[in-house]
Structure formats: structure tokens, C-alpha cells
Image: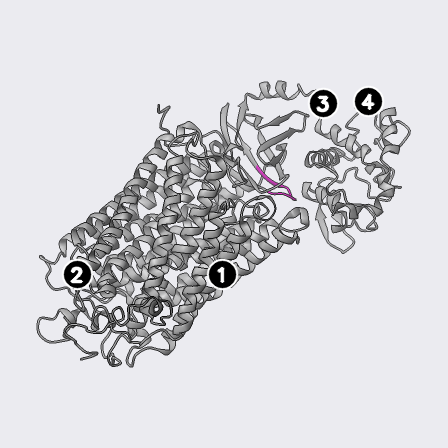
Amino acid sequence: METATHPVEPKANYLNVDYTVKSWLLTTDHKRIALLFLGSITLFFFIGGFFAMLIRLNLLTPAGDLVLADTYNKLFTMHGIVMIFLFLIPSVPAVFGNFVLPMMIGAKDLAFPRLNLASWYIFMLGASFVLYAILTGGMDTGWTFYTPYATTYSNTNVITAALGVFIIGFSSIFTGLNFIVTVHRMRAPGMTWGRLPLFIWAHYATSVIMVLGTPVLAITLVLVALERAFHIGIFDARLGGDPLLFQHLFWFYSHPAVYIMILPSMGVISEVVACFARKRPFGYEFIAMSSVAIAVLGFLVWAHHMFVAGISIYAALIFSLLSFFVAIPSAVKVFNWTATLYKGSITLDTPMLYVFAFIGLFTIGGLTGLFLAAVGLDLHVHDTYFVVAHFHYIMVGGAVTGFLCALHFWWPKMTGKMYPESFARLSAVLVFLGFNLTFFPQFLLGYLGMPRRYHAYPPEFQVLNVLSTAGASILAVGFLLPMIYFVWSLQYGKDAGPNPFRAAGLEWMTPSPPPTFNFDETPVVTWEAYNYDEIDAPKKGVEVAG
Amino acid sequence: MWPNLPLFPARASSMAGHVDALYFALVAITAFFTILISALILYFALRYRKSRSPLATQVHGSTALELLWTAIPLGIVMIIFVWSSVIFFIQTRPPAGAMEIYVVGKQWMWKFQHTEGQREINELHVPAGRDVRMIMTSQDVIHSFYVPAFRIKADVLPGRYTSTWFHATEPGRYHLFCAQYCGTQHSGMIGEVVVMDPTQYDRWASGAVDGSLASAGEKSFQQYGCSMCHRADMAGRGPNLIGLFGRQVLLDDGRTITADESYVRESILNPGAKIVSGFKNIMPTFQGQLSEEEVIGLVAYVKALGNGSAGLPIPVSDPNSFNYPVAPKPETSAAKSDLPATPPAKAKPAKPAAKQ
């Protein structure tokens, strides 16, 4: 049962091995690359959040008094592009997948360390194009680049932004490829597929989507650029093209992309709920397989974004049916997480608070998805604030909450320091309350009929919009607070020790911060995943480091 | 400061009740499961908190439970699927005999044309208690015709016709929104649907000054020289259009299609796409030469030439004449003077390239 080593205090670790800038910029250590990603996407998150704040402030008044219509259109476009391509898509995989995935399976690094570093450079190159497009006037197509508006009518930096997103796609593909090969080839002896943490299963499924879906987005953006630059008739009806073709191609990637954003967070939740309930997750196989099912079904539902776009009645019905199917594996996950709490030994540390927030918000987000899959009802709520509320419950309530959960769970492992627990709990509560106040009123606005992407609106929608803006301010505090106490903890935080939460999993059996090659010797796994019974057993069983 | 705080939209169409019923059912399902999950989480978090439950009891899973919570949601969503599909069929299949209104969306306004001839911008008058079908196209980017009080929405695309329909029930004024982002003044591309008492509406509609939509189309039909080839006496180089609309048309590639609005539109703008069996591909394209309004007028005219069941050629411009208005003889001098001015029908074959 003994694995790895049990050093008292790490002397050399991946952080203190070298302090030079060069050692960071040329590192091939997956843990350092994870931190490079963490720094970059945190910056982008706050840029995207700044745009969101301006949007909410503008919507305080029906006339949209804060900014001009053109500026508003650029704000929601830039908010969408930055949050989706520069934050959500890389978020959990590029940071926590990068950091803990190799450690979880007992590997020294990812299969292709240099490809991993290239992935960050490519991401930053693409991000630079997007930022350049923003700084030189922005873009106003919506993050969806719908044609023929994006190809013929918009006067903004569409090609630059599309090029940026195109480049970022390669980063995503490389990360996905790296994860797939690593999981297949780099597992420690005894780490069978049935013993893989659910975080790994979720990332494996995500990686498959990244590798298969992203090229389609790349192709689509190239076609947009070609039509815009050279007037080749592909999507513009006046040039003989078909605007619906664009939507099919775009959503073929961008619906599965929703699962790229949410599946990794689901993996986080499975880890954390087990740790703070001190239990193996209920129905391990079903949670694992539901990740795979979501990845597969996710490719078959794209046209539910097009129910009102003029597709045929029967196409709409088929896609409606398939969209209902994809609800099932998500429901299975929620029930299994909840059942994991049954007969557990539960503590409410900050990561666990985020788990509760995630389950609650994701449940609402998922169930409101049924409203949109129901094609007869979708005709009313499509392109209204109902949709905005729904996907923010998934993307912020789900994906971002999962990201924060992961950050609080693995921060001690990454830095060796503890954050102040009381502030962390406060911020979790603020995020939960602020989030609901921001987005719940938007469901009501949507059913009332307020269309999305409106710079100004009829006065009867004002009260709900003011509530939403008030919530956004609370949410902003909830997001800024962790910035402060995480940075504070680097200097003043208590030492975490190898395993402050007494969690199961190989990543906790090595010092915090871990040494450059993670383990002093390759661990041999002889136990099942989530062996909390052995960890918590009063006498016999595994002795947990620390 | 706060005018009011509505939490539910007005119901003003026959569709609203169907959609709202499904909405309430889904709200109930959502509330039930959200409360169930939240209550379980809170109960477990208290009941099994560490101080009361110092050591967890490992429960690895239960296939029976997994099947149960797969099957129950599956059953629920299948019921919802069937229910919503039934509503969708109603929404997408306009009843026969619905009155028709043509819509052209452009950045950033809605243009409406009633068959009686009334034209409107950003305000749409419709009668209560009648089925109204909207035939829509866009002059530029994609727009979306959305009337929340009717619970309907349909995208309006360039280069094709889409349609939706409603049956307004309550006279009043209702929001009309563009729901598909279309550029700077997207949020300004709004208007009002004015639902009127049917008799009031008839009075309003008959006040058109320019004559009917079909008569406007007839003028274009003459002006652009269509009448030179599409002759009533079957001797023209193009197919006779009398009685065409709504009929099955045999194409030269063996397919049979129904002559609907989209087909007529396509045949004007891209005549080579579907060639009627027995005719040659000689018609020039009118792409770029006709505005969407003119195309709509022509479509309405072709429609008025008979929908196949009427049989008789209906001279829409002149109710006193029973002659199909293409023959040179009964032509007014105005129409005659048009003909020499528009020789394109013959001279055209050289011209289509000008489009690019």
C-alpha cells in the first residue's frame, strides 16, 4: 500500500528550482505551464468581466444611456469572445488538467511536454490577435460571427478576431491530444481505467471533443475570412451562398464546445464531493460513462440553436429529440453527486460550498435547457434573455463555479500555502447570491419577451434589469475577493503540507508544491480510486502523507 | 420611476395558451427537481455532518437506483418532447385560407405589404380573429420577426422566404421585436402590431391608395417585359403562368415541385435553377434588378393569376376585362409605352453578367 515517498518538508520543488524568467518561458514542466495558463486566463477573465460590468451598467436605464449602440454591440461581442475562447475553453483543462492530470495517474509529465508549452504560446499568440482587435476598435458581430452580417455588413475587426480564435483552436487541439495520449500511455503501474479518478474521465471525454470539434470551427472561420476578404460566395445569399450553412458549421463545433467548458468542471465536482463527504462517489461507473455519453451526444444536437432559423420541420424535431437525450447523462451525474453525500462524513470547507453551488445552479441551468429543447416553446424564448440566463447558469453557475472549486481545492497543492478559509467561504456565498440575483431575473425578462443583444429596451423591463445589475455588482465582489486572498496567501498563508484535506488520489501523495518530476519514484497503485474508507480507517490502512 | 413590473407577457394569440401551458409544466418540473436536489443536499449536509457522522459508510452504488433515475427523467422528457412537437406542428403549419402579409426586413426597419395594397413601416395592422400568414424575406442580413404576445418567432433571411402565422385574439397594441442581432440599431428595429376589430381592419385595409399588391406586381410584370415570353396564349417562350400557383410543376430533370412563393421567387431571381419541362433555359436573371418589394409584387401577381383551382385567368388590374393582360391589343397606352422602354426580355441574355 505504500507508495511514493514521504518527505517531511520539500526542499526542491517545481517553483523554487529556478527563479529566472527564462526558466518560466522555456519550461516544459506541466505544472509551470499550468501556472502560465492560470495567470493568462485570470487576466482575460477580468477583462471579460469588465465588459460584462459595462453591459450591465448600460442596461440600468431603458434608453441605454451609458454607451452608444455601436459600443454596446462591441461590448457584448468582446465579452463573449474573451470569456468563451480566452477563459472558459482553456480554464479547467489548461490549468487544472495540466497541473493535476499527470499527477493523478502517477506520471512525471504529460506525454508531449514541449507540445504543451507550444500550446500556451499558441494560445497567447491567438489571444494577442483578439486583444489587438479589441484595442484597435473592437468587433461587433456577436461571438457567433453570424453571416452575412460578419462577412459583408460589419465594419469592425472581424478578420483579426476570427484569426485569433482560429489560432487559439490549435492550442485547444494540442492540449486535447496531449491529454488523450497521456491517459493512454502514461498511467502508473496498477492505474487501470477502472481506477482512474473521475476528473480524468471527464478530461478524456473533453479532449475527444477538442480534437474532433475544433477543426470544424477553424474551417468555418477560414471560410468567413475568405468571404469577407475576397467576396467568395459561401454564406452570403447575394453572392450565391447560404447563411444557414454557416450556422450549421458554427454550431457543429460550438455546441460541443459547451461541453468542453462544463465537462472538466463536472470532473472537479466529482473529486471534491468525494473528498468532503469522505466517500467513494456513488455510481463511479455511471458518472464516468455519462461523461463519455455527453461527449458523444453533444455532437448530435447542434441544430437546436437553429429552431427559428428556417430549418425544416422534421430536422427541428429530430434535433429536439436528441437534445432531450443529452439531458439524461447530466441528470445522472446530479443524482449521483447528491447520493454521494448520503451517509458521508461531511465538512463544509470552501471547495465543498462551491460543490453545493455548482449542483444547485447546474440543476437549474440544465432543467431550463429543457425549455429550449422543447421546440414549440423555444419559438417563443429563442434569442431572448431566457437563453442568456440559461447559458450563464451553465457557464458561470457551472463552469466558473467548478473552476473556483478547483482553485480552492488544489491551490494548496500548487503553492504549498493555505488561503484564509473564512474569506474564502464569504466569497463563495457572495458568488452564489450575486449570481442568482444577476441571472434569475433574466429568465423572467426572457419569457416576457426581451430579446438579447438589445442596447435599449421598453421601460417595463427596467425593474428586472436593475435587479440583474445589482446582482452583478455583488458577483464582481465575489470574484475580486479571491484575487486578493490568494495573492495574500502566497506570502502569509499557512503551510499546507502534502495533503491538507486528507484527500485520496496520487497528487496528494507527494509534497506541496510537488517536485519537478512529481514523484521521487513511480508510484504503484494497488488500491481502488477514492479509498476514503482506508484513509479514514482508525488504525489499519493507508497512511496518508502529512 | 417604475412604470410597472410585469412578470408575464400579454396573451394575444391562439398560440399563447398552448405555449404557456407547456411553460408552466416545465416550470413545475424545474421547481420540483431543484427543490428536491437542494433539499436532499441540505438534509444530507446536516444529517451527515462530521460531528454527527464521524466515519462515512461507503455505499458504492446501486444499479436499480441508476436505472430509476435514468428512466424517470427519460420518461418526463419524452412526454415534453411529444407535447412540444404537437405545438410546433401548429406553429409551423398555417391553416389553409389564411390571409397573407408580406414582410421585408432591412437594417433597421420592418416593411409590411398587405395584399389589399396598404404598405406600412414598423407598424403592422392585423385583424383579430383571422389567421394571418407572414411571408418574409430580408434585404440584407438575418433578422427575426418576434411578437412576444403571440409567442411566435421566425428568422427572416436574405435570399429566401420564411413564414410564420398567428391568429390574434385580443385587439390592442403589442411589441414587435427583431430578435436576431443585425447591427448597430438592432434594438431599434422594433415596432408595434396593432390588432384591430375585423370590421375596423377591413375599413383600414380598403383605404389603400395605390391599388392592390397584385396590381403593383402586374405593373412590374409589364415594365420588366415578363409578359413578352410568359404569354397567356401558351405561345410564349416561357411557361404560361395562369393557374400556375399552388400547382405541381414537372421539371426537366424529372422532379415535381409545388409552385409556392419560394419557387416563384427563385424562378425570377435564379431562373436556371428549376426549368419547367419542355422549356429552355433562356430566361435572364433579375437578381439585383428588382427590389424585394417588386419581387413580392410579382409573386402576389402570379398568385392572383389563379391558384389552379380557379381555372379562369383573372385580370387583376382591370375587373372589367377578362383578357389576360399580356396581349398587346387591350393594352393601355401607358403600358404600351413601357414595352419599348424595356426591351431587356429579348436583349437580356447578354446582360446577366452585369450583376457581378
Q: Pointer 2 and pointer 1: residues touching (CB < 8 Å)?
A: no
* Quarter of the figure with residue A285: bottom left
Q: Chain of mark 3?
A: B
Q: Which residues are magenta?
A: B157-164
Question: Residue tagged by mark 3?
Answer: B210
Q: Residues within 10 Å of mark 2 (few under 14, many from 20)?
A: many
Q: Residues within 10 Å of mark 1 (few under 14, many from 20)?
A: many
Q: Pointer 3 and pointer 1: residues touching (CB < 8 Å)?
A: no
Q: Could you say whether the residue bearing mark 2 is in a helix, strand or loop?
A: loop
Question: Residue tagged by mark 1?
Answer: A167
Give whichever of B344, A55 is nearer the camera.
A55
* Quadrant the N terminus of chain A occupies: bottom left
Distance (Cα) linking label 3 and label 2: 79 Å
For badge 3, the amino acid type reads Asp
Distance (Cα) linking label 4 and label 2: 90 Å
Give whichever of B87, A203 is nearer the camera.
A203
Q: Position of residue B340 (x, y in %)?
A: 89, 33
Question: Residue tagged by mark 4?
Answer: B320
Q: Pointer 4 and pointer 1: residues touching (CB < 8 Å)?
A: no
Distance (Cα) linking label 2 and label 1: 46 Å
Distance (Cα) linking label 4 and label 3: 18 Å
Name the side, left or right, on which A91 lies relative to B247. Answer: left
Residue A109 appears anywhere in the view: yes
The disc label shown at residue A344, or none: 2
Distance (Cα) linking label 4 and label 1: 69 Å
